[in-house]
Image: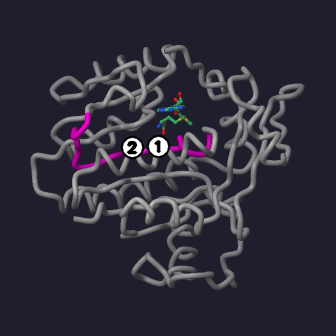
Amino acid sequence: MAYTYPDKNDRITEDLIRSVSKGDYWKKSEEYVLDLALKEIRELPAPRSMLDLGCGEGRLFQVFAPAVDSIIALEPDSGRCAGAYQSAAALAGHSIMVLNTDSSILMDGQTFDIILSSHVLQHIPPAMCEKMAADMAAHTRPGGLLVLTTTHTDEAGDILTEETMQDGQRQSRRVSPEEFLTLFNREGILPVRLFAENSILELFRSHRFELLLRRRFHYDGAESAAYDQAANEEIYGLSGQGPEGSLPAAKQYTANARDCIYIFRRSE
Ligand SMILES: C[S@@+](CC[C@H](N)C(=O)[O-])C[C@H]1O[C@@H](n2cnc3c(N)ncnc32)[C@H](O)[C@@H]1O
């Protein structure tokens, strides 16, 4: 298969991070939500198998390998996959199999205790996103976990954007659903769908995933993960799951969150 992720060397994403985040906040903010995922994963009985669907260069192998017994990592872009082979090789002693492909390689009935989908869904066409959610349901064992990180918008519906670099600077432009479909498979154009929380919840609940926990992260201008924690407590309460339906507006912690983690359990 020939697929090339359009943001070569993550130039667009890294420019975004530079423009909205100070110091090591971006990294610490993600660590804050990945720690929550690790806590849930460690409560599953061992041995634990993980599918990293869209692993990129294997950035998260080092985070999850110590908590699971095996990882199968799929990455359709051959250049990024080469990076993932190296990341796996650097973690000798852990069982990590990297394959240059997508979920079509999985066999009927093949299930994992955990599926990880990190920052993938926002960059694929909506119809493919529906198909990927169905594939995730088919390949998560009942009682297993889906760890999903993706974009976030406070608006009631999803926002579709085109991201590009122009004169060394990232440009983001809102587009219509029709135009969004024309942005795929074009080098240097990164389609980004910002998900309203209810659209993620509806999609995955329709595939028999129950929400265990959600937390927003990557707040514009925040300086430490303590901000994230306080902001999430304000929105969702201490349980982290929050009320159903529309959420109360943030009163004190009003910065815009770029991303959200959703941890779902596949119904038995
Ligand atoms: C933003 S990167 C995230 C990489 C990695 N998960 C991480 O968090 O560092 C999105 C990745 O999804 C991959 N991708 C795109 N379409 C995919 C598909 N249909 N199935 C699996 N991965 C896909 C891209 O090639 C790219 O490496």
Q: Is residue 116 above or below residue 97?
A: below
| Residue 268 position in % (x across, y down) | 21, 65
Pinpoint residue 64: horizontal percent, then vertical percent: 29, 43
- Number of other residues with Cα within 10 Å of mark 2, as a class: few under 14, some 14 to 19, many 20 or more: some
Q: Is residue 65 left or right of residue 257?
A: left
Q: Position of residue 123 (x, y in %)?
A: 62, 39
For numbered disc 1, what is the local secondary structure? helix
- Residue under the point 36% across and 63% down: 208
From the top left corner, tell me how far across and down residue 62 is, in percent: 32, 36
Which quadrant of the figure has residue 52? top left
Within the magenta stretch, is there residue 119? yes
Secondary structure beneath disc 2? helix
Q: Are marks 1 and 2 in contact (CB under 8 Å)?
A: yes
- Pointer 1 local density, CA inside 10 Å: few below 14, some 14–19, many at least 20: some
The relative height of residue 15 versus residue 29 in the rendered view (above or below) is above
The magenta stretch spans which residues?
108-123
Residue on which the image places disc 1:
132
Kindly give the residue lying farthest to the front in the view shown: 108
Residue type at mark 2? Asp
Separation of marks 1 and 2 at Cα, in angstroms: 5 Å
The residue shown at (22%, 52%) is 141
What's the coloring here?
one colour
Say if the magenta span includes residue 154: no
Q: Amino acid at mark 1?
A: Met
Asked whether mark 1 and ligand 1 are closer than 8 Å, the reply comes as yes
Picture disc at residue 135? 2
- In this picture, residue 182 sits left or right of residue 128: right
Residue 196, above or below 148: below
Q: 68 or 35, which lies in front?
A: 68
Q: Residue at x 63, y 29 (%)?
A: 10
